[in-house]
Structure formats: structure tokens, C-alpha cells
Amino acid sequence: MTRRDILNIFHEPFGDAFYFGPERISPAWTRWPADKISKSGMSHYTYTLVLERILAAAKDQSKRVFIKDIAEHIVPPIHSPNAAPPSLQHLFDPHEERNPSLFPTSILQQFQFVFLIRKPTSAIPSLYRCFIPPLNAMTDESMLDPTELGYREMRLLLDYLYPPTSRSASADDNKRGIDTPILIDADDLLADPPAVISALCARIGVPYSSSMLSWPSPEDHAFAKSLFDKYAGYHEDALNSTGLKPKPASRRDERVESREELEREWEERYGAEGAKVIRDTVEMCQGDYDYLRQFRMRT
């Protein structure tokens, strides 16, 4: 978000249609205050409207479009496996074989995909905080939906874009990025942000600058807040940060080695009921995370 001079940035744009629009797929709205959708200003956002805005921005040759989004916003989650937004159907060739996403392959081919994963034992407890006080007063949520976490959908998308039969088995080819996904594990990113971000920039053809790792200015924070406001409560840590710095494992992290110790920590923080939700959700996501992690970018 700090390179607004060379990037046209969209933050979870397909979430607007997924959660708020007339083609919404998520059942989250059934748990929200009655006026949340009408107040969002996005109740008319169809998938086609969002896509058209992105493609229009892509016509600006002076900037590349950069989209950060969640896999289940574009790959139907398990609770809605047959989701097919009406506004998109005219884009499909009637003889075209469908892919796992909501879009025809001709649309997917216009984008370069970068996958970001985080181990469930870290991601799920962090997300769970958004469904309990005090953050749930901002998110208007009180239930973590284990079917909307994106691990399964990311795996489906990766396997479609990079079929197992097309992946390079050569270590040299892997280093050059031939027929290999661009996938980053958050642990690797936090361990050495400059190395990972510079390697990513090299892969996607964006000039690297150390300024990508810090956002101390009021302008940076105002821009981030303008993008994050629609999901109030979910990005508080990011909004309160000023940069991405190496985060080596603390002594306490190193001590928490076993699953039993982690679960004890969850119960201490979130109670028995919360710990069970986290444990069950981690179990649901772990296999897909382990599968995805084998493709992580190494620097």
C-alpha cells in the first residue's frame, strides 16, 4: 500500500459482492444488524460491477493493479458449492469446462496470482479475537465460520492454475519460478521481510523498495484506514502498526512446542468453548495448509 505511485490498489474487492451485494454468497448477513448492508453502500455491488472496476483500472498503463483478496470470495466455499453469480454468466462460453472459481478461465488468465498462507495454529486464534469482546462490537460478529477461511479454496485454485502434471520437478526450474506457484508462508515473511518481499517483487516484476516495509506517515495510515473501514475490527493490528520488521521467535514461542501446550494456552485465553472452536477449526484447515506449504517460496 506504500507504493501508490506505481500500484492501483484494491483491498478485498470481491468481498463486497460476496458479503454485501445482491448476489451475496456468504450467510454472514443473516447474523448482522438489519441495516448493516444498507449502510455499507455496497448493497448494489454485483460480481460483474467489481470486475469491471478492476479491469477499468487496469487500462491505466502507468500503474499495475494490485489486488489483495480472500480465496473464498472467488472460489465457492463448501457451504455454497454451486454458487454462480447471475451477473457473470454471460462471460462463459457455453462449451467451456468450468474451473473451481466463479469466473471463466479467460478472466483468470488476465491475473498473476500470489498466494499467502499462515499456519492455522496462529491464524485461527488471531481471527477468533474478532468474534469476542471487545472487537466483536466493531465486527458485528459473534461466530467464527470455519467454512469461510480460504485454505480449501486456495488449494483448489492453486491446483487448477498449476496442475500437478505441469509443475516442474527440477530444482533449477523451481529457483527460476518455472511452472511453480508464487506462494509465501507468513512465518517466512515475518522472519525476514526484506528478503521475502524483494524476492516476490522479482517474481512479479515490480521494482523493490525498502519503503514497502514501513508506513509511518499520516497519509499511509489514512489510505489504509479508507480501505479497511468496510471490515472494521479485523485490521486493528495493521492499522496500529508502522512497518513490517523481522519477528524472530520469542523464547516463549520456542517453549510452546506441543499441541497440548497450545490448546492449554487457548483455553486460558478464550475459555473451554472458545478453545474447542479454535481446535476444531485448526483441524479442518491443517491438511490444506500443509499441502499448500510445500510450494512456499524459498529465499
Image (cartoon, rainbow, N blue to C red):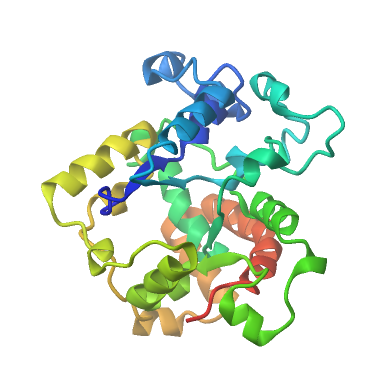
- Can see residue 77? no
Camera-side residue of 6 and 240: 6
Q: Which residue is nearer to you in this view: 43 or 96?
A: 96
Residue 55, relative to residue 191: is it above or below?
A: above
* Residue lying farthest to the right in this orientation: 95
- The relative height of residue 30 versus residue 152 in the rendered view (above or below) is above
**Most foreground residue, 273 or 105:** 105
Where residue 251 sits in the image (x, y, percent)? 35, 85
Task: Please state which of residues 228 and 90 is positioned toward the viewer in this rendering.
Answer: 90
- Which x, y percent locates residue 50? 50, 28
Q: Residue at x 39, y 36 (%)?
A: 231
Dividing the picture into quadrants, the one containing residue 193 is bottom left
Q: In the visual, does 68 lie left or right of 94?
A: left
Residue 280: tell me if it is visible: yes
Tell me: 241 left or right of 46: left
Q: Residue furthest front?
A: 61
